[in-house]
């Protein structure tokens, strides 16, 4: 995926269980906050493949992605 594309990331914090693996797969893009729910840091700091993998492996499908403004189904 060429670097000029823009991935946007949202997390449905009501779905998030705080268990990972998003923040282990892409630690510069995801972290846990004080409420033990995931937050988005800087998606551009990780390879797009890692962002896709994080979304794919989220056990509650709480991570939503778009690529250049178009919803992306990981
Ligand atoms: S993988 Fe999904 S459920 Fe787990 S912490 Fe990340 S967003 Fe939350």
Image: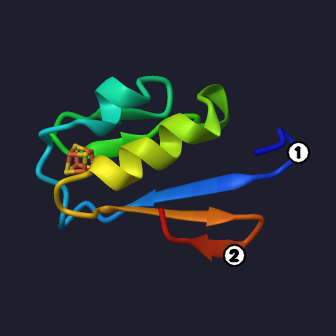
User: In the rendering, at what x and y percent does residue 66 appear?
Assistant: 62, 66
**Mark with earlier residue (2, 1):** 1
Neighbour class for label 1 at 10 Å: few (<14), some, many (≥20)? few
- Residue 70, numbered circle: 2
Quadrant in the picture for the N terminus: top right
User: In the rendering, at what x and y percent does residue 21 appear?
Assistant: 24, 36
Mark 1 Cβ inside 8 Å of ligand 1: no
Total marks shown come to 2
Q: Of residues 71 and 16, which is closer to you in this image?
A: 71
Residue at (41% x, 24% y) in the render: 27
Q: Is 50 rendered above or below residue 14? A: above
Residue 59 is left or right of residue 69, and the answer is left
Residue with the most extreme bottom position:
70
Q: Of residues 49 and 67, which is closer to you in this image?
A: 49
Q: Of residues 44 and 35, which is closer to you in this image?
A: 44
In the rendered image, which residue does mark 1 sit on?
4
Quadrant in the picture for residue 36: top left
User: In the rendering, at what x and y percent does residue 4 appear?
Assistant: 88, 45
Q: Is 43 rendered above or below residue 67? A: above
Residue 57 is left or right of residue 6, and the answer is left
Determine whether the residue tagged by mark 2 lies in a helix, strand or loop: strand
Residue at (69% x, 75% y) in the render: 70
């Amino acid at each position: 995926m060429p670097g000029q594309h823009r991935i946007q990331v949202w997390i449905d914090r009501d779905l998030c269980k705080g268990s990972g693996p998003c923040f282990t797969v892409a630690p510069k893009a995801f972290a846990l906050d004080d409420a033990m729910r995931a937050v988005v840091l800087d998606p551009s700091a990780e390879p797009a493949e890692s962002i896709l993998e994080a979304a794919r492996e989220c056990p509650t499908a709480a991570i939503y992605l778009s690529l250049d403004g178009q919803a992306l189904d990981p």
